[in-house]
Structure formats: C-alpha cells, structure tokens
Amino acid sequence: QYVPVKGDHVIGIVTAKTGDVFKLDVGGSEQASVSYLAFEGATKRNRPNVQVGDLIYGQFLVANKDMEPEMVCIDGSGRSNGMGIIGQDGFLFKVSLGLIRKLLAPKCEIIQELSQLYPFELVLGMNGRIWVKAKTIQQTLILVNILEACEYMTAEQRKQALAKLSGN
Amino acid sequence: PRSSPSPGETSVLAGLYGPAEVKSSKELADRAVLEVLLRPKVGLPGVLERSREQLLRRTCETVLLGVLHPRSAITLVLQVLSDNGSLLSCCLNAASMALLDAGLPLSSLFCGVTCALDPQGAIVLDPTAPQEQEARAVLTFAIDSVERKVVTVTTRGGCSMEEMQQCLAAAQRAADTIFQFYRDSVRKKYSK
C-alpha cells in the first residue's frame, strides 16, 4: 500500500468538493486535501474547474503519520510545472510501487522503447497510478498492457513484444 | 492479501485490510487500531470466537508497529474453511502470513503450534480433532521468529510445569519448520 511522503508526485482522484478544499483519494490510509488556491493562476475569483472524479497530478506539501496529507499543484515559485488537472480521455491504471520507481529511474529503456512505437502522453504517480493517452483507444490499451506486463518481463521479452507490435 | 495454510485438514482463509480510515469514535491518536474477526465454518460467531479474536488481536498487536500508522484501522478477517484440530494455531499462522503479505511494519513474525498431551503423557504436535478430544491437555503456543520467545500461551486441561516446559521446547523446534514454510511461500510468490 502507498504511504504518502512529502515531495512525492502522485495522481489523486477527486472524491469531494467541500467549500474551499477538495478531497483526493491517493491510495493511502487517508484522503489528501488540496486547496482550490493551490493551482497555477488560481485566485478567489478565478477558481479551477475541478469536478468529482477528475484526476489531479500534484505533490505532497504535508505528509507525515500524524496529520492528514495535503497536496498542491504548484511548486515553490507558483508555477505548475506539469502538475494540475489531468485532461480528458486517457486511461488510469495501477501498478506496483516498485515498477514506478523503475520507470522513473534516469535512463529508463522502457519509456524510450515505447516512444519509438507511437506518440503518447504519460503521467506516473508515485502511488502506483499511471495515466496514459495515445491517439486511438486501441493504442492506449496496448500501452497499458505493455506497462502492466513490464513488471514481470525481462528486457529480452519486452524487446520481442515491441518488435512484434511495430511489425504490425 | 490472503493466505490459507493447512496443517492436516484444518484450513483458514485470512484477509487483511488497511491501514485504512477509521471512525473517530474508534480511532487511537498515537497508534493503529487492530480489529480481528473470526468467522466459524457454520453458524454465527459465538463467545468462543470472540475470545479467540481477542487472543489473536493481542498477539498481532505485540508484533505490529502500530505507532507508524496513528489514527488508522487495520482489519483482519479469518474465515474457517475446515476444522480438524489445531484450529487456533492455524488461525495464528494465517494471521501472521496475512500481516507479512500485506507488508505491514512488524517487529517479528510469529507462528502457532498446538501440543496435545495424551493420557499416557506423550506429546503430539498439531493434533487432529480426535487426538484433541482424547488428550488430557491441549496447549497452543505463539512463538516469535527472532528469538523463539513465547508471545502467547493458552491451555485447555491440566498439566504439570515439567510437561509444559517439554511442550514448549517441542513447539520451539517445530516453529523452525513453520518459519521455513513462510520463507518458501514468500519466495515462491515473488519469483515469477
């Protein structure tokens, strides 16, 4: 199970909108909270358009065992840096925490090899959640299956699988 | 995460959930709350199940590092699938494997071993139901994995102190086999 850590970037699912704060499910023992002002360009008049069920990519500002975790979608200087509400469509799925760390390692071959296949958007959450979006639904699902299988495949098997797919 | 070990034909299915959110009436400010539910094979849980639940809860709380998850709830549900003796030690083993499989922070593992003293005074390890019936005394030990210390003892029937020491020694030796089984199961799970 995921344990929130300060500074970790995770994908959360909005479960409630109460006044000035959104509650996010991040896969931990407790839900995290995000203030509506913690988005880039948000002011009291200009509120972000967040609905229940949306996906948010943010980082933990406060995360220890004694307090409710808090997330923000801006960095120290107020810029969003890729964080915020994740767009429409695409596919969210769960993998093990170990695989995420492998994918986030500096020279990850898996991501490089996949980008040779087709162009896609990818968001990796340290809580084990991955969001992928490719041009067609079929391509998206193929990417999902490969990423899920990467857990158990060796580099050889993966190269074979990708070769078969790009041959098609 | 679930695990169901079975000495002989006794088998118990364990499901562990958590750490998860807990009602504020039940939460503890500095540690996790562990709840154990034991469901018999037939019928509703009765007083015997309740007392076993408390025993399992206290054993698990001894090894669980609850202070790492304050204001959380951890729920352990045990379902008895079949009972042919040594049920309590089977539950202890299932509970320990469930805690291990879930990746919760533990100070050690534990295992359950049942000893029965038959009327002649011989020690029978992990007795079957008929052997338990005939026995003069049935002792269940929960042994920890780090120094083979005793975590929990519960007995039914009477025995002398020497006999209890002998049963304990036998149980500690048997614990080695059980901990090796834990290792092998985990190894199998992660070596695809």
Image (cartoon, grey):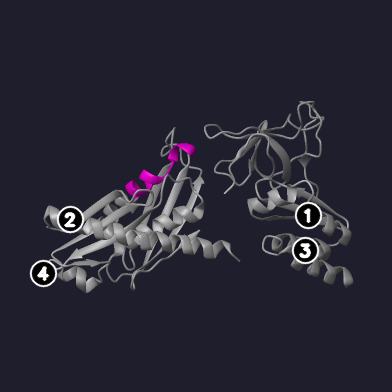
Q: Which residue is mark 4?
A: B120
Q: Are marks 4 and 3 on the same chain?
A: no
Q: Which residue is mark 3?
A: A141
- Please tell me in which quadrant of the rendered image residue A167 appears: bottom right
- Whether residue B46 is visible to the viewer of this picture, yes or no, is no
Helix, strand or loop at disc 1? Answer: strand
Q: Which residues are magenta?
A: B57-71
The amino acid type of the residue labelled 3 equals Leu
Q: Is residue A76 left or right of residue B186?
A: right
Residue neighbourhood size for the residue with mark 3, other residues' Cα within 10 Å, grouped as few (<14), some (14–19), many (≥20) = some
Measured in 3D between alpha carbons, the distance from the residue under mark 2 to the one under mark 4, in whole angstroms, is 15 Å
Give me the disc on residue B164.
Answer: 2
Residue B46 in picture, x, y percent from top left? 27, 58
Q: Which residue is mark 1?
A: A132
Indicate whether residue B191 is drawn in magenta: no
Q: Are marks 1 and 3 on the same chain?
A: yes
Task: Specify the subunit that label 2 lies on.
Answer: B
Q: Residue at x 81, y 36 (%)?
A: A81
- Whether residue B93 is visible to the viewer of this picture, yes or no, is yes
Q: Residue at x 38, y 62 (%)?
A: B178
The amino acid type of the residue labelled 1 equals Val
Q: Tell me: residue B126, above or below residue B61.
A: below
Which marked residue is nearer to the observer: mark 1 or mark 2? 2
Measured in 3D between alpha carbons, the distance from the residue under mark 4 to the one under mark 3, in whole angstroms, is 67 Å
Helix, strand or loop at disc 4? Answer: loop
